[in-house]
Every structure is written in structure tokens, then in C-alpha cells.
Image (cartoon, rainbow, N blue to C red):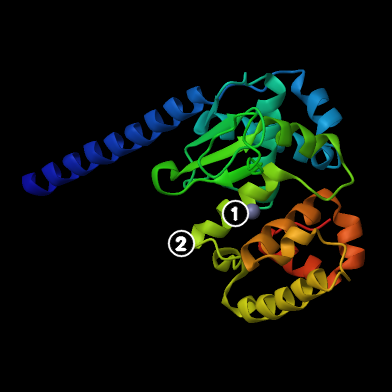
Amino acid sequence: MQVQFNVMIYTLIFIVFVIFVIYAFYIVKAKNVKAVPKHWHSLLKEHVLFYKNLSKNDQTIFRKRMMLFLSEIHIDGVNTEIEELDKILIASSGIIPVFGFSNWSYNNLSGIIVYPDSFNEDLQFSKADKNKRILGMVGTGRFNKQMVLSKKAIRLAFKNKTDKHNTPVHEFVHLLDKMDGKIDGIPELFLGKEFIEPWLSLMHKEMEAINNDTSDIRKYGGTSKTEFFAVASEYFFERPKLFKQKHPELYKMLSICFQQSK
Ligand SMILES: [Zn+2]
């Protein structure tokens, strides 16, 4: 009887301890997430069309998720100052493609490096270099878990709301593509096995149309499966209504992939 009683006491103490640890973990985590500055709502409405089109309730969720994103991902400027608007636009780009998933943390990303302008493959951005054409990239090797973005491209992505082009969203879509281990234009983790074949044949058809100049999807999407997925997704998030009208099958597929439809 005494032994059983002891076991019960120890079990109870252990359970209380576990609950305490979980509670403490959440308190620490919650403390890192800053409150949403009041004026961000109007900044978001002004600059981020995706946000503007959300319901009031979803806008509140969007803002909270932005703050969680900013508490988890470090943003550093190289030769450029990271202004408040840059933070808002970068966090928005991160949230837009994953907004359909109720809980999401980019565990394959720890930091974002922002350069003032486009850069070359060696991450150089001197004015004299004519090969500096890259606007954004997902880092590999030494830069694994890093993303590099051009500040000019971030600003431009949200300034022009009709061009179906958004560099930071493009890079975040590459990161989602990378979740299954490789960036190959096949988001296996999100599509589910039964949609892989249909996705491949649809992608083939749409890429052919791009390369035959009979598609309104940006030319860069015809260069590889990887880029097709990212470029088509930019269009899907930037101009959903037009995309649905022009590419209904592709729209359906990306709605399944991102668990969002508009
Ligand atoms: Zn790309």
C-alpha cells in the first residue's frame, strides 16, 4: 500500500513538473513576440493588397502571425538600413504563402540578409559589376537557412500591384518547395501524393505555353520546374482573380497546395 502511495505521489509531482515546464516555455515564447504596433494596420492596408482584401478577423490573425514571424526570423541589412516598412513587407511576404496553414514556422529559415540593390552570384553588389542581376535567393552551403533579398525588389514587389511579380513571395515559395528536401518545383509535402502526377503534366503544359509565347505567365517561369512553381505562385497571390480566369486548372492546383482560394 505504502509503495503504491509513493508511486502515486511521484507520478503526481512529475505531472505537475511537466505542466510547469510547458507553461514556462509558452510564457518565454509569448514574451518574445512583440505587440502589433497600432499604425501597422493602415500601413498594411496601404501597401499590401493581400492584407487589404482579407476580412477584419483574418487581418487580425495576419498581424499576429507577422509578429510571430518577426520574433523568429532575424533581418539584417548590409549597407542599407532596415526600415519599419521593410520589416512589414518582408514579414507579409513570409505570411502570404502560408496563410492557409493554421500554424506555420519556417524551420528552414533563421535569417534574412537585405542588400540595397540586385547582387551577383558571389553576393557582391558593387555598382561597377554589370552581372549583378539577382533580386533574391534562398541560400545554400554557407548560407543555408538564410535568404538574401534586394531592398529595391522588396519595395517594388508591393508598389506595383498589377504586375503579377513579387520577388520576396517568390523566394518564400522556394523555401516551401524546399520543405521536402529539394527545391524542384514539386511541393510534395503540400500537394499530397495523388496530385503529384497531375501537377507534373499540368506544369509541363503550362511551361510549354510560356516557351511558345502563348501564356501571360512571366517568361522566367519557363526556364525550369523550380522557377515555374515560384513564378506561377507569385501570379496566384498577386492577381488571384485574373489567374483563376486565365489558368483555372492551375488555380485549382495551387489552391490545394497553399490551402487558400480567392
Ligand atoms: Zn527563383
Is 83 placed above or below 65 here?
A: above
110 or 18: nearer the viewer? 110
* Quadrant of the drawing holding the C terminus: bottom right
Q: Nearer the viewer, residue 68 or 75?
A: 75
Which residue is depicted at the point 77% across and 39% down?
Answer: 157
* Tag shown at residue 181: 2
Q: Position of residue 237 (x, y in %)?
A: 78, 51
Question: Alpha carbon of mark 2 to alpha carbon of mark 1: how far?
Answer: 11 Å
Q: In this view, does 7 lie to the left or right of 190?
A: left
Choose top left, top right, bottom left or bottom right for residue 2. top left
How crowded is the residue under tag 2: few (<14 C-alpha within 10 Å), some, or many (20+)? few
The dot on residue 256 is: none
Q: In this view, does 262 lie to the left or right of 140?
A: right
Nearest the viewer among 203 and 252 is 203
Q: Does the residue labelled 1 lie within 8 Å of ligand 1?
A: yes
The secondary structure type at the circle numbered 1 is: helix
Residue 238 appears at what percent x and percent y? Answer: 82, 49
Give the residue number, with chain letter if any, for mark 1. 174
Q: Tell me if residue 68 can be seen.
A: no
**How far from the left and from the top, in percent, is residue 259?**
70, 59
Using the image, determine if residue 212 lies above or below residue 239. below
Task: Name the amino acid, label 1.
Answer: His
- Of the image marks 2 and 1, the number of the one nearer the N terminus: 1
In the rendered structure, the answer to whether residue 102 lies left or right of residue 18 reads: right
| Residue 63: % across, % down | 70, 32
Q: Which amino acid does label 2 sit on?
A: Gly
Q: How crowded is mark 1: few (under 14 residues within 10 Å), some or many (20 or more)?
A: many
Callout 2: CB less than 8 Å from ligand 1:
no
